[in-house]
Amino acid sequence: MGVASRIPPPANEIEVLIAQLERLRERVVRYAHRHQSLLLDLPEERRASAHNLLCYLGLRQLDLRSLQDRLAHLGLSSIGRAESNVLATLSAVLHNLNVLSGKETSRPDVYQSFDELNNRLESNTEKLFGPGPGNRRAHIMVTMPEAAADDYMMVHHLVKSGMDCIRVNCAHGNHVNWGRIIQQKAYAERVMGRRCPVLMDLRGPKMRTGPIGAAAAVLKIRPRRDEYGKVLRAARIWMAPDLTRSGECAMADACLAVDADLLSACRPGDRIELEDARGSRRRWKIGEVSAEGCWAEARKTTYLVNGTQLRLKGSNRSSAVRDLPRTDGSVTLRTGDVLYLTAHEESGKPAYLGTDGTQLRPGRIPVPVPEIFRDAQPGEPVIFDDCRISGIIEKRSDEQLDVRITHTRKPQEKLSSDKGLNLPETRLELPALSPEDVQDLDFVASNADMIGLSFTNTPEDVRELRQRLLALDAAHVGVVVKIETKRGFANLPRILIEALRFPACGVMIARGDLAAECGFERMAELQEEILWICEAAHVPVIWATQVLEGLTKRGHASRAEISDAAMGQSAECVMLNKGPYVVEAVRMLDDILRRMQDHQSKKRSMLRKLNLAI
């Protein structure tokens, strides 16, 4: 079979494409010119980035898919990677179309023009996060636990494993605690010879459930059983007069504070008898006995409360169980129940149920955000605890919202204090900075390299933070705007232009709250759009929320978490939350990001040599 001759494209096809690209370029330029007033007073070095953002927004006003296909058929760029330099990309495609058509071109500088903006994102990333790690493009940020204030080795191992910057969550701890964490970080920097910038994340408006009355102290003790219910190992119970002076609790299934008079009479093989909180009779066997206390074994599940009487069989010695800690209260909810959200500061209360389980009196939970009761309206949705529970506002007053529960993940869910609350359809007029943020700002501005602005909804929110920093003579501090609401996402372009007034700025995709606000099914689309818009403005992005969460919290990651972490290489920084296995998570994330950058850079596939062949 002979070699097929090349079939050139129809002459008029190239002419049509040239005309279409020229009209598109003119439209983009006109769009940017119409909004040029937004760039007034921007620093000179930021105007090109803001102008490119306007050009990108103008480009994306049209559906370009048909044009992309026709360009790809000619072996040309499909303008799908135009974010960082929109006009140069359009000019390059036009130049190549003119070459194909045989026309003379007067654009000898078209390729050099790419360099003018293409390095801006890398430069801005270094301004915000410090020098790159060298062996990978994306930085790794870790949220510091409060324990890091007194644990230098934890910080040392994190830096050694690949952490590039730290996050201090100002919703927890205080100035003393934050200062000690930063001191530990500074010492690790000196020892390791690496810079590790600090993001201090302001708490923002507290969109969380308030306190709920503590539940009765109940301790459940149960043996370990197999899948058939057979006891594999009895529950081990440590009993001592003073639990604070004993290290045995770390090895026990349960620890009880018991009177010394009872324990002094216990011998190995003795029996402790009791009637538990359900009225069930139980018998424990005494094992080891020491001067500090004694061990007992329980082969049946036992429920204890303060005051439960323990009796030594065959003697008159007994003791009441004491000092069991009260557990945090909660409100149990099912689909169809009503929940009262109140503006009162008093602790919430669970629902009152009838003998058949019918809700006789709804539960109530305080919400310490008075603006909610002013702005929310009947018919608007309310979402709790990352979509575990959701409902609709049925009735409102100045001090209460009546919410009808429409969805629970399980047939019955418990809503406790300090859980997230979202009102995705409510136009909340909340201050950008809470009163606590204003009090903390002087300390934060003096110690942070960048400040996280929580629940950024409008450019005015960013402007207020900048004005307060100028008043504190802290104009050098960078800002990270957190996009975690539907309103913040809608206002992202204007928020970015305002953020470009800072010497360094970035965006955090707070995927937990954003998913609750916009729906989990839209999350993949939204995070991609945020990445595109930020790249057009040459603003670095932090990929945040539950990255490698299973590994960080429990020591093992799921397949979905590994894939999610790999997608994080599209951002300039990936953030891990605190957890007992966070050092292992940093090591794994470092490995994933280094591997993936050989295959993907932002949206562009990198054609590294494959180790596959026939």
Image: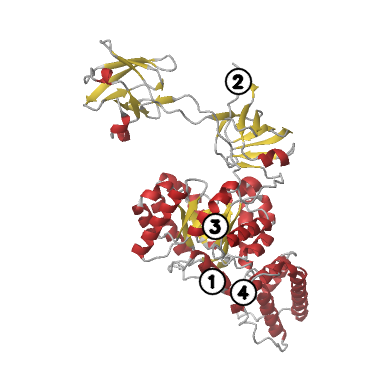
| Quadrant of the drawing holding the N terminus | bottom right
Residue under pointer 3: 451
Mark 2 residue crowding within 10 angstroms, few (<14) / some (14–19) / many (20+): few
What is the C-alpha distance between the residues marked 2 and 4?
64 Å
Residue under pointer 4: 45
Identify which amino acid the numbered label 3 is placed on: Ile
Q: Identify which residue, 522 or 20, lies in the foreground.
A: 522
Residue under pointer 1: 123
Mark toward the viewer: 3 or 1: 3
* Occupied quadrant, residue 338: top right
Determine whether the residue tagged by mark 2 lies in a helix, strand or loop: strand
Image coordinates of residue 398 in percent, x first then y, are 72, 34
Looking at the rendered structure, which numbered label has been put on residue 72? none
User: Which one is earlier in the sequence, the residue at label 4 or at label 3?
Assistant: 4
Residue 371, relative to residue 559: is it above or below?
Answer: above
Mark 3 residue crowding within 10 angstroms, few (<14) / some (14–19) / many (20+): many
Q: Identify which residue, 99 or 1, lies in the foreground.
A: 99
What is the C-alpha distance between the residues marked 3 and 1?
19 Å
